[in-house]
Image (cartoon, rainbow, N blue to C red):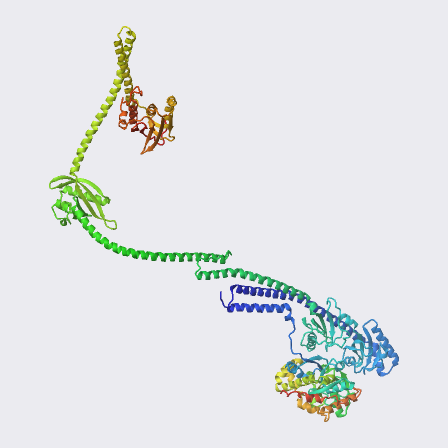
Amino acid sequence: MEMRIGPRLAGWAWLGGLLLLAWLLVMTGCGAKAPAGQELERLTIAFQVWVGYGPLYLAADKGFFAEEGLELVFVDEELDAARRDAFEAGMLDAEAATIGLLVNKRAVGTPVVAVAEVDLSLGGDAIVATEDIHSLSDLMGRRVALARDNVGEIFLSYLLHEVGLSLELITIVPMSPDKAGQAFLDGEVDAAVTYEPWMSKAIARPGAHILVSSRDAPGIIVDILTVREQIVRENPAVVRKLVRGWYRAVEFYKANPEEASRIIGPHFDLSPQQYAEQAAGLYWPTWEEALEDFGTEDKPGRLYEVFDTIALIKHNNGRIPHKPQALGALSPGTLRSIYDSEAPTR
Amino acid sequence: MKMRIGTKLMLAGAVCVLATVSVVSFLGFCIGGGALRNEIESHLVSAAESRAAHVGTFLHEHEEMIEMAATSWVLRIGLRSLETGAADRAAVVQDMNTRLLDFIHPVEDICELLLLDRDGEVVASTTPERIGLDGSTDAYFVGAREGPFVKDAYVSTAPGQPSLAMSAPLLDDEGGRLLGVLVARLDMDELNALTCDRTGLGETGETYLINKYGFMITPSRFTEDTFLKLKVDTENARACLADVVAMRRGLLAEKHEHEAKVFVGYRGVRVLGVHAHVPEIGWGLLAEIDASEAFAPLAKLRSALVVFGGLFTVAALAGAYLLARRISQPIHDLHAGAERIGSGELDFRLDIRTGDEIGQLAGEFNRMAAKLSESYASLEQGVAERTADLAQANEELKGEITDRKRAEGALRASETKYRTLVENLPQRIFLKDTNSVYVSCNRNYAADLGIRPEDIAGKTDCDFHAEGLAEKYRADDKRVMDSGETTDIEEPYVHEGQQMVVHTVKTPVRDRQGNITGLLGIFWDITQRKRAEQELQRYAQRLESLNAEFERSNRDLQEFTYAVSHDLQEPLRKMNTFAEFLVEDCAECLPENSLRHLRTIREASLRMKDRIQHLLALARVETQGGEMVAVELRTVINEVLEDLSEQVRECGADISVQEDLPRVRADRVQLGRLLQNLIGNALKFRSPDRPPRVTISGRERDGEAVFSIADNGIGIEKRFSERIFGVFRRLHQAEQYEGAGVGLALCKKIIQRHGGRISLRSEPGIGSTFTFTLPVASQGEEENP
C-alpha cells in the first residue's frame, strides 16, 4: 500500500517529538538549570543619600553599567566611619562622597583613591536659618544642627574660615543631614547645615531662609567617586567601566533631563519635577571638565587644591590626626584612560 | 514517502503512547513534584524567617539594654565630673567601672562595656586596659553620637574576636548635650547559636547571616574561618541585599514574601535557598540546602516516573507494534488477496478469522470473490452458450429458411392434396362462421345443394332446408360453438326429396389464440347402415329368445335325466332282485339256459344300474353343486393323496407337487373329485415298464389359474384326446383297465361348472398331461376348509 504521510501525520509526529523532548527535559531536570547569562563584574558601592549621585541609579537602570559589563551593587551605609571600616575590611569597593570624606579616609590610611569628579554643589548645600539670622556672624552662640565631620561641617568651617570666624563659637548640635533638616523644621535648632533633598523640606519652616548656599561658594563642595586602591591597581578595567557608566549617565541626563529625572526620582522618593528642581542646585561636570579639574600628577588640577584646603580645615578642627597628601589620593590616570581602549560613546 | 499501514498505525500508537506518557509524567511530576517542592521550600522559608526574627529580637533586646544603661545616672554624673574635672577622676572612673560591671554581670554575651567621653576617649570600661584609648573615629562612637547605634559585625582589635558593638549616647539632662557614648561589645556566640540552629535542615542545610556587603558573619557549616572573609556572592545573597536596600528606601515592605530558589551556592554546588532580613542592621539571613538533598524526593519521583514511563513506553510500543501488526496483517492479506484476484486468480480466498470488522470484510471479500468467480464462470458459460445458441440459431435459421421454403412448398402441395382430398371426399364438408353463415363447402355438398361451391359463401341453412330442419342445424351449430367440443350427431337430411339419415361431425374452428371463429361440419350418409343395424337388432332379439328356450330345454333335459335315472333305479332294482330270487329259488328247477339267461338279465340290470349311478353323478354336478369358495389347492391335493396312499405305495409312484400353487375359487368337494379322477387315472394308466411319476404344477395366467397334471404313463393317441372326455367313452377293454368311462366326462363337467377349460396333450408310450383352468380366488377371500 502506498500512501504519503499527510500533514496531519507529520503534525502528530512533531507533536509527539515535542512532547517527548519536553518529557525528557522535565525528567532529566534540565529545565531546572539556571539560564546561562553574561557574567558581569560586580562592584559594591555605598554613599550617603545625595541627589548628585542620581546618575548612578540612572546608569544602572538604563543598563549603561550592564552594557559596560558591570553590575553595581548598592549598599546603604550612611555612616562614613562604617564605610571606612568596610573599605578597610575589603567589603566595600567604591563610594560616592565628598572630597572631605576622602580626606578623612586618607588621613587614617583607608586605602581609597578618587577616580572621578561627579558633581559640584551649586546651591545644593546650604545653611537654612531662622529669619533673625542674617549673616554668618549671627550664628555665633546659636544652636546649629549639622553632621559632625561631614560636608556640613566642612562647608560651614570653610565659610567661617573665609570670614575669620571659628566653629568653636557656635553651639553645634550634631546630627545627620536629614535629621538636621527635620530638627530645623521642628524648631529644635536655629539653623541647619544640610543639603537636598532635606534642604527643600527644611525651608518650609515659617520664616526660614537660606542663609548661604554652595552657590555662594562654588567648588568647595565637590563630590568624587572613590574606589578601593587595590581594585584600581589590580583591576583598572572595572574602574573604567564604572566611570564610563557614570559619564554616559551624566550625558544622558543632560540630553534627556525629563526622562532621567523620571528614572532617578523614585530612588530619592521624589517626583521627577522635584528631582529636577533639586538637581538644579548642583552641577555634573563632563568628562572633559573632570579631566581638567583633576589635571595630572605633573600639573595638578583644581581638585588637589580643594583637597588640601579641606584637609587643612579638618586638621584645624581636629577632625583628622594629620593632613593627608592630595597626591596619591586623587587618581587622574584612571580618568584619562577610561576611553583609551575605545572611542567615547557620545 | 511510502509507508505501510502497519508502520503508520505503530507510529500513531507510538505518538499516542509517548504523548500520554509525557503528559501523565509531566502532570505527575508537576503536581507531585510541585507539592513536594512547595513543602520543602516552605520549610526552608519558615526556617529562615524564624531565625531572622530571633536575630532581630536579640538585637532589639540588647539595644534596649544598652539604651537603658546609657541613661545611668552614675555614668552621666561621672562623665560630667570628668568633663569639669570637679571630682577625683580615679574615684569617678572606679565608680563608673563598677557600674559597668554591674550592667554586664547578668548578661553573659556582652564581652565588655566601654564608656567614651564626648571626644571619643575611653574613660571607663569593664576591661580596665581599654581605658584611655581613642575611639573618636570608631563607628560605634561616630554613629552613637546621633543616637543608638549598632556597629556591624567586626573583628575586635583587642582580643581579635568576632564581635558586634552596640552603642548609645549619654546625654545631659539639660538640652540633650552629648556627654559620651556607651559601647557594648558582644561576642557572636549567641547570634551564632540563634542563627546556626540546623534542626530540620538535614545533612547539608544551613542558615547563616551576611552583612550588608554580603560577607558571612556567622559560621559556615562547611567552611572554616569565614567571618568577614567569605563574600557570599550568590544570587540569593544579591537578591537579599537588594531587598535590604529597597526596604531601607521604602521601596519594599519589611514584611514580604520570600521565595526559595535554586542557584549555585557559595561552595559552587547547586542549592535551594531562601533569604530573610534583619532590617534593623541590614543583614540578610540565608537558609540553604543542597538541591540534591532537598530534591531527593523529587529525584526519586522523577526516577520512578522515568523508569515507569520508560517501561510503559516500551510495553506500549510493543503493544502498539503487535496491535498494529494484528490490524495491518489482515489488511495486508486483504490487499494481497485483492491483487491476486485483480490479477485474475479468481479462485483465491482469504483465510482471515479475526471475527472483527476486518474478518467480516474478509468474509464479504470471499463472498464477493466467489460471486465474482461464479459470475465470471457463468458469464463465460453464458457467452459460450450464447455463442453456441447463436451458431445453432443461425444454423436453425438457415434450416428454418430451408424448412420454411420446403414447408411452403409442402404446404402448397399439402393444400393441393387437402383440397383435392376435400373436394373428392364422398362426405359433405362445409365451413360456417360463428353466425352459422356458410363460408365454403366441398363440391359434393354444393352438388347436393344444387349450387357451385363458390356460391355457398354468405348463405345459411334457411336458404337450403325447411325451416324446422334449418333451425335444428342452427341450434346444433350454436351448441357446438358454445361448448367448444367436437360433437357427433345423427340427424335427418333431405336430399332430392328423399328422407336420409346422416352422421354429422361438427367441430369448432379456432384461430391461433384459441378463439372460436367458426365451425367445420362434415357429414355422410348412414341410411344403409342404420337399416342394417335395425336388422341386426331384430336378429339379436331372436337369438336371445332362442337361447332362453335352449336353456329351458337343457334344464328340462337335466331334470329329465335326473328323473329318469332316479326313477329307473327302482324297476332295475326290482328286476335284479327278482332275477336273483329266481336264480336262487329255481336254480335246480330251471334249465341251465334259463339260468344263464337269468344271470345275463341280472348282470345287464346291474350294469344298467351302474350306468344310471354315473349318469346321476353327472347330473348332480349341476343340480347338487356346492358353494364356490376360496380353496388352497395344495391342501386338497394332500387330502386326495392321503386317500390314494395305498395305491401310491403299491405302484411305487413318485408324485411331486409344486409348492406355491395358486389359490382358486371352487367347489371344494367337486375339486377333490376332479383331482382324484385325474391323479387316479395317472396311476391307473401307468406304463408297465417304469414306475409312475406324476408332476402337479400350476400358475396364474391372464387372471385365471392354470394347472397341469403330467404323468409318464401309457399315453394316448392324439386323435382320442377330445373323445376321452365323452360319457361312457373307453379306449381300453374293461378287463385291461377297469372303469365305466365316466371319470373324464365328470371332470370336464366339473371344470365347465367352474367356467374353466380342460384339455389333454398326450403321446403314446411317453405320457399324458391334463391341463385345466380355474378361477383365481380374490386376494382378501378367506379359505373355506
Residue A99 sits in which quadrant?
bottom right
Residue B376 in the figure: left or right of residue A203: left
Return the residue nearer the eye: A243 or B504: B504
- Of all residues shown, which one is farthest toward the bottom? A299
B349 shown above or below B572: below
Determine the residue positioned at 23% across, 24% down: B552
Quadrant containing the C terminus of chain A is: bottom right
Residue B423 in the figure: left or right of residue A211: left
- Of all residues shown, which one is farthest toward the top? B589
Residue A224 sits in which quadrant?
bottom right
Does residue A130 appear in the picture of this structure?
no
Instruction: Tell me where residue A152 appears, x and y as whole percent.
Output: 73, 86
Residue A136 in the figure: left or right of residue B660: right
Does residue B618 appear in the picture of this structure?
yes
Return the residue nearer the eye: B611 or B723: B723
Residue B359 in the figure: left or right of residue B229: left
Instruction: Tell me where residue A334 appears, x and y as whole percent.
Output: 70, 88
Instruction: Tell me where residue B675 appears, x and y as whole percent.
Output: 34, 25
A178 shown above or below B524: below
